Image (spheres, helix red, strand yellow):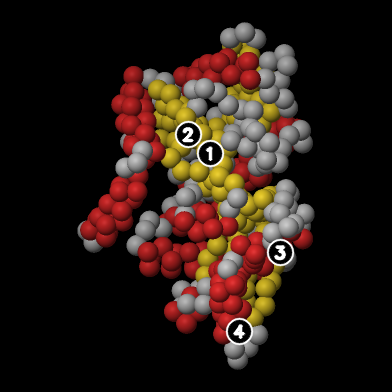
C-alpha cells in the first residue's frame, strides 16, 4: 500500500487470493451487479483471462472516508498494454466496489488510477460499460464529467402489476404464440425446465454453446466461442454454487428446443445467453419467444422487479423494454505510445454515436461476407 494525492492510498493486487478479504467484504456493503463479484471474475480469469494473456492489477484505493476496489487487469494487444476491467467478453456491466462514495474524490480517484496504470507500464487506461444506474435502479454515484457515453445502451423492463409482459403483445401475436406452442407440442408434449443438478446444468450449457455456434455460423458473424477459454467459462460458471446462474429450457422429449443461460440476483433477472435449435421446422414457431414468456413468469416468481436484457441495441429489446440505461466510459492515454490509440478510438466512438451509425451498420453487414470468403 502506498500513499497518493491527498491521502488516497493505492494497493495493486496481482492475485485474487490477495484481494479476497477486501473484495468479499465490500460485496456485503452495496448494490453490486453479479458481473462485479469475486466468484464471477475469478472464474473468468481462470478460463478466458489466463488463456488470453491478461495480467491482474486489482487496484484497491483507500482514503480516510472510503474504500474502493477496482477489478482491473492488463490486456496486451498489438504491442500496447491497456488497463481495463476484468470480465471482458462476458460482463455486460462493470465498475468498482466501494463501502461509500464521495463524488468530490473523483479527480483524485482518476489521478490514482492513472498512477496505478503508469506503475504497471500501461499505455492506455480504459474503463467502459459503466452503468448509469445501480442494480436497484438508483443513479450510479460513480460518475465524472470526464466520462462519455458509449454508442450503445443497455435495456431492461420494470415489471408493472397493471401490465404484465404478455399484455405488451397484440391479440394477433398472442394467438400466434398459442398456435406455435400447439404445433411444437404435436406428437409429444413440450415442457419448461430449470436445471437443478450439476449434470443438468452442464448438459444444458453444452447444448446452449452448440446452438449459439450454429447460429453464429448461419449469420456469418464472429464466433465468440472460438475465443480461447470462452466455452470453458460458461461450463465452469454453471457449476459454481457461489454464482446465481439460472439455466432453463423448453424441452421436447430429451431435446432442448430453446435455452437460456442467465443470472438471477433480485431485484434483477439477467437475460444473457438465449439460444434455440437451428431446425427450420422448429425455429419457424419462435421457441425463443415461448421460452421468454416462461422466463418473465420465473422472474416475477423470484421477486424480481427488473428483467434486464443487458447491453446491446438489438431491435427486439425495444419491444419489451421500458428502460434504456446509458453506459459510460473513460479512456485516457498513459504513455506517448498510447496517444494514437486513444485518438483513433475516441474518433471511432464519436462516429458510432453520430447519425452515420445506421449507414455504417448496413455497410458492415454488406461487406462482412466478402471478408469471410478469404
Question: Residue drawn 63% across and 32% down?
Answer: 140
Q: Gap between marks 3 and 4, in whole Å?
A: 19 Å
Give the secondary structure at mark 2: strand
Q: Do the residues labelled 1 and 2 touch (CB within 8 Å)?
A: yes
Give the secondary structure at mark 1: strand
Q: Are marks 3 and 2 in contact (CB under 8 Å)?
A: no
- When the figure is inspected, residue 137 is found, relative to residue 3, above or below; the finding is below
Q: N-terminal of the two: label 3 or label 2? A: 2
Relative image position of residue 216 (x, y in whole percent): 41, 63
Relative image position of residue 325 (x, y in whole percent): 56, 42
Q: Gap between marks 4 and 1, in whole Å?
A: 40 Å
Depth check: 372 or 225 in front?
372
Image-based side of 271 in relation to 302, left or right: left
Q: N-terminal of the two: label 4 or label 1? A: 4
Q: Do the residues labelled 2 and 4 touch (CB within 8 Å)?
A: no
Depth check: 15 or 153 in front?
153
Question: Residue drawn 77% across and 54% down?
Answer: 303
Q: Gap between marks 3 and 1, in whole Å?
A: 27 Å
Q: Badge 2 is on which residue?
A: 149
Relative image position of residue 88 (x, y in whole percent): 50, 43
Image-based side of 276 in relation to 221, left or right: right
Relative image position of residue 20 (x, y in whole percent): 69, 34
- When the figure is inspected, residue 327 is found, relative to residue 166, above or below; the finding is above
Q: Badge 3 is on which residue?
A: 297
Q: Badge 4 is on which residue?
A: 182
Q: N-terminal of the two: label 3 or label 1? A: 3
Q: N-terminal of the two: label 2 or label 4? A: 2
Amino acid at each position: 500500500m502506498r500513499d497518493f494525492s491527498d491521502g488516497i492510498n493505492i494497493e495493486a493486487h496481482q492475485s485474487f487470493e490477495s484481494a479476497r478479504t477486501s473484495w468479499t467484504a465490500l460485496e456485503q456493503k452495496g448494490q453490486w451487479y453479479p458481473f462485479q463479484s469475486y466468484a464471477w471474475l475469478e472464474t473468468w480469469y481462470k478460463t478466458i483471462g489466463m488463456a488470453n494473456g491478461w495480467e491482474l492489477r486489482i487496484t484497491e484505493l483507500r482514503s480516510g472516508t472510503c474504500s474502493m476496489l477496482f477489478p482491473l487487469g492488463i490486456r496486451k494487444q498489438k504491442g500496447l498494454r491497456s488497463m481495463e476491467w476484468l470480465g471482458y467478453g462476458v460482463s455486460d456491466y462493470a465498475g468498482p466496489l466501494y463501502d461509500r462514495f464521495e463524488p468530490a474524490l473523483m479527480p483524485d480517484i482518476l489521478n490514482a488510477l492513472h498512477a496505478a496504470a503508469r506503475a504497471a507500464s500501461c499505455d492506455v487506461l480504459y474503463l467502459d460499460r459503466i452503468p448509469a444506474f445501480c442494480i436497484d435502479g438508483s443513479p450510479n454515484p460513480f460518475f465524472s464529467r470526464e466520462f462519455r457515453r458509449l454508442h450503445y445502451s443497455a435495456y431492461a423492463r420494470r415489471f408493472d402489476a397493471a401490465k404484465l409482459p404478455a399484455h405488451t403483445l397484440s391479440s394477433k401475436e398472442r394467438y400466434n404464440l398459442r398456435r406455435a406452442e400447439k404445433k411444437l407440442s404435436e406428437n409429444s408434449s413440450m415442457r419448461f425446465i430449470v436445471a437443478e443438478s450439476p449434470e443438468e446444468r452442464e448438459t444444458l450449457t453444452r447444448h446452449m454453446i452448440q446452438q449459439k455456434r450454429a447460429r453464429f455460423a448461419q449469420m456469418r458473424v464472429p464466433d465468440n466461442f472460438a475465443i480461447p477459454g470462452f466455452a470453458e467459462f460458461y461450463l465452469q460458471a454453471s457449476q459454481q454454487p457461489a454464482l446465481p446462474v439460472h439455466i432453463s429450457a423448453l424441452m421436447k422429449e430429451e431435446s432442448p428446443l430453446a435455452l437460456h443461460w442467465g443470472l438471477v440476483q433480485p431485484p434483477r433477472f439477467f437475460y444473457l445467453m438465449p439460444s434455440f435449435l437451428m431446425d427450420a421446422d422448429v425455429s419457424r414457431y419462435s421457441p425463443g419467444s415461448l421460452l421468454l414468456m416462461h422466463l418473465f413468469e420465473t422472474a416475477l416468481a423470484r421477486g424480481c422487479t427488473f428483467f434486464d436484457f443487458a447491453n446491446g441495441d438489438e431491435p427486439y429489446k425495444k419491444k419489451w423494454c421500458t428502460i434504456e440505461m446509458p453506459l459510460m466510459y473513460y479512456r485516457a492515454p498513459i504513455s506517448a505510445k498510447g496517444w494514437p490509440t486513444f485518438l483513433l478510438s475516441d474518433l471511432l466512438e464519436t462516429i458510432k454515436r453520430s447519425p452515420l451509425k445506421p449507414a455504417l451498420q448496413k455497410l458492415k453487414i454488406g461487406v462482412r461476407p466478402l471478408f469471410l470468403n478469404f
